[in-house]
Image (tube, rainbow, N blue to C red):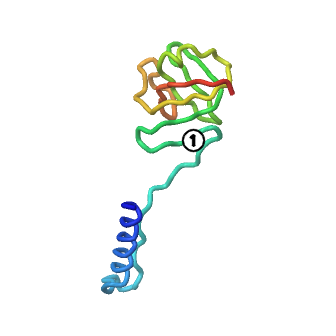
Amino acid sequence: MTVVVGVIGLLWQTAACSSAGTSNDPSGVRPSVASSSVPPVPSGDVPGPLPWGARTLTGVVERSGECTMLLVGGRRWALTGPEAAALSPGAKVTVRGNLTTRPAGCGDRDLAQTVAVTRVETA
């Protein structure tokens, strides 16, 4: 109920603002409201709320030194945690977890982001 009342109030306020006053711009063109662009989502990547939301990723496990990664489409994601450490390179899996900071072992690699893995399923 609170959400509905809030949305109605926002719509009313937007309508009131858009009809009030004239533009100082001589061309009569009003600037549009900027919206954040959302990058395309690669196959197997289901985004959550940013910046620290939950993620579900499906891809192939890779390992290089101390860095465990998941190849999803053309992007690599760093994986952390005990669940990630137990993964075998070459395995196709679905992992679930939350975004976290990049582990030191993954250094300067070109990685999308890092997921602290909490659950793994064979894909």
Residue 6 on image: x %, y %: 36, 65
In the image, what residue occupies the spot 63% across and 15% down? 88
Is residue 88 found left or right of 50 in the rendered image?
right
**Residue at which label 1 appears:** 46
Q: Quadrant of residue 25?
A: bottom left
Is residue 119 found left or right of 92 in the rendered image?
left
Task: Give the answer, above or below, for where 107 lies relative to 44.
Answer: above
Is residue 102 found left or right of 60 in the rendered image?
left
Q: Amino acid at mark 1?
A: Val
Tell me the quarter of the image containing the C terminus: top right
Viewer-side residue, 119 vs 80? 119
Task: Give the answer, above or below, for where 78 lies relative to 48.
Answer: above
Furthest-front residue in view?
1
Tell me the quarter of the image containing the N terminus: bottom left
In the image, what residue occupies the spot 63% across and 32% down? 58
Viewer-side residue, 14 vs 8? 8
Residue 47 on image: x %, y %: 53, 42
In the image, what residue occupies the spot 59% across and 16% down? 87
Residue 91 on image: x %, y %: 67, 20
> Element under label 1?
strand
* Label 1 Cα crowd, 10 Å radius (few <14 / some 14-19 / many 20+): few
In the image, what residue occupies the spot 44% across and 39% down? 53
Viewer-side residue, 112 vs 8? 8
Viewer-side residue, 35 vs 93? 93
Residue 46 on image: x %, y %: 57, 41
